[in-house]
Amino acid sequence: MGDELPKDEAQQPSLTFLFEDPRLVMGASSRMMVRVISSVTYIFLGAAAAALLLFPDKMWAKAIGVCIALFLLDRLVHLADGEKSLAELPHEGVVNLAPYLRPLAFRAIQEAFQKSLLFGHDFYLALAEELLQRREVREGLHRLDVVPEEFRAKLDELLREGSAAPSREEQLALATRLVAAACGKALQNGHHYIRLADLFAALATMEDPLIRRLFRTFGIEADDMERALLFSIARSRSLFGGGVLAGIGGFRHETHRGPRHRIMNRAWTSRPTYTLDQFGTDFTDLARQGTIGFLVGHEKEYKRMVDTLARPLNPNVILVGDPGVGKEATVAHLALNIIRDKVPKALFDKRVVALHLSSLVAGASPEEVQQRLQRIAEEIVIAGNVILYIPDIHNLVKTSGGEYMSAADALIPIVMNNAFPVVGATYPKEFKEYVESRSDFVGAFEVIHVEEISEDEAERLLVYHALILEQMTGVLVSFGAVKEAVRVAKKYFRQKLLPSSAEEILKEAVSEAKKKGASFLSPDVVVAVAERKTTVPIHEATKEESEKLLHFEEIVHQRFVNQDEAVKVVAQALREYRSGLARPGGPIASFLFVGPTGVGKTQLAKLIAEIQFGSPELMVRFDMSE
């Protein structure tokens, strides 16, 4: 049976997937026989390797023994891997997905396949039963505030209800559809193989009445399930040699020795860059150490940047975006992909070096600055393997300060001659004020606007930051807390962009939980922290507050006479806000009170602040006459 992978998930628009394997049609005795033969073969090979290595004078025997030992060691190291990596997935044609599953994931499908045929169970429910036995799936449910035992009880109840016994062909079609969706999840999350967690996340997307009923009972959305499972996936990858968390720090053991500085490419054609190294930071060194390079979102901006840097003419980019939006993270991700050889041929084996203009001009005369820049440019041209990254590139073209004018005069002509690739970063205000007016300078660059990441991407990134906070504090973070931090940050803390605003709230919430001796961070603590920072009620209305809102007009009129229409409109707006019916993305409400002096305009505003927010002091008054 075949199934097409969703385009938005796998970015493989012309692939058709199959799921076929002889082990799926084997009986229990046949499968047991295969396992016994396999185990006996490995035991025999191990014994043969040991015996051959014991021959004292036979070099040929030792050589064969070493080869067998290396083969067994390789099998042991890759025991949990699939036969093929998803990195090898072709771009078109018909592909059998069975070799891309990890052995544990395939075994879960195999067991569910057999149980479904034998007992007449729904295939997806049988698979959920198998997956629920795995630690990473149980942890994902726990992160969603779902008790795994309660989930299992409901699953058993649905299994007992029974269903029509499916045929083998129907089972295979269901399995193919599921594995195709799981492959999309695995590719989306950068996995090399289809894992147990990918199967469970894919289960939540299946159009099966029983499995949908199971997930709906616990209020589990498909996207939430996928991101909650990232907790256990990221933890296992960080503990067992993975680098998914290394690029954001916090998951590496401290070392007294810094990263080895490499200036030589693998072709041994580059040259040292002593002056550049003195005033710059080598991002490829940091990426090799594992301290930078992690990126969530910004796929379009990153692809445009790489395509531009790889072209022969004008290989220069300016990244324009607000502080904390991810400009430097995008450049750091390029450094990481360079050391992984995941870049176009033109960028292969390059170094990404950030030039710090502040240290370059510190304590130097304009002539010295110009000489330094000239030496740096000459070193880069001679080396031939450097991509120059200039943070705050607007400082090059500022009209204030002799040093910066000297820097611009020395470097801009070199940049415009396409001598080497350059990536600059600046902010929208500075770009418009200083850079955009220099048409000769802007013309040499491809301008890429780096936008704020989406809430979904922020949730995904915050999962990894939450794991770091857990390691530091010992407080377990629920996915609900992560989701709530992103929601309130997006709605109430617009002075900062995602993910920075959400990270700050989550950090404060974890700190608050730690102070109170809590071992688990729930969404309520995040809401409480956000309320303290904004003095705006964000939590669900309590019974007492609901009574206040229902009788708002009566409470106001105990201390306020007349103005019934104004009081009624204000009360209606507050009730809509606290019930979640207000317009998203805007203020609670905006009112213009018009009337002569003394009719109660200011008094009504004070009463609103006192009743809704706790104190009339929380009203900010601007006297426009002053």
Image (cartoon, rainbow, N blue to C red):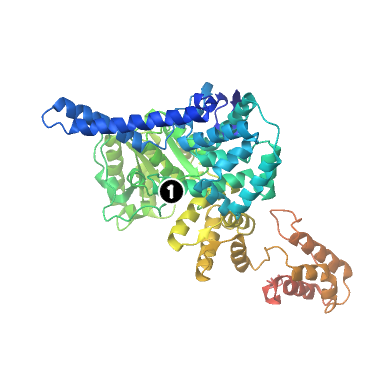
Q: Is residue 324 left or right of residue 7?
A: left
Could you tell me which secondary element the residue under label 1 belongs to? loop
Residue 310: percent from left, percent from top? 41, 31
Residue extending furthest toward the left: 57
Q: Is 376 or 50 nearer to us in this picture?
A: 50
Q: How many marks?
A: 1
Q: Is 559 or 211 nearer to us in this picture?
A: 211
Residue 203: percent from left, percent from top? 61, 39
Q: What residue is shown at x 57% (from left), y 26% (from top)?
A: 13
Q: Is 430 or 191 nearer to us in this picture?
A: 191
Q: Is residue 448 left or right of residue 218?
A: left
Residue extending furthest toward the front: 29
Residue extending furthest toward the bottom: 559
Q: Taking 177 as reference, is 570 above or below it?
A: below
Badge 1 amino acid: Leu
Assess disc 1: are there few (<14), some (14-19) or many (≥20) residues with their C-alpha within 10 Å of its C-alpha. Answer: many
Can you see residue 579?
Answer: yes
Quarter residue 265 falls in? top left
**Which residue is tagged 1?**
245
Quarter residue 334 falls in? top left
Residue 353: percent from left, percent from top? 35, 44
Residue 273: percent from left, percent from top? 26, 42
Q: What residue is shown at x 76% (from left), y 55% (from top)?
A: 581
Q: Taking 456 as reference, is 122 above or below it?
A: above
Q: Taking 324 as reference, is 166 above or below it?
A: above
Q: What residue is shown at x 46% (from left), y 43% (from top)?
A: 330
Q: In this view, does 282 lie to the left or right of 324?
A: left
Q: In this view, does 377 lie to the left or right of 180?
A: left
The N terminus: image quadrant = top right
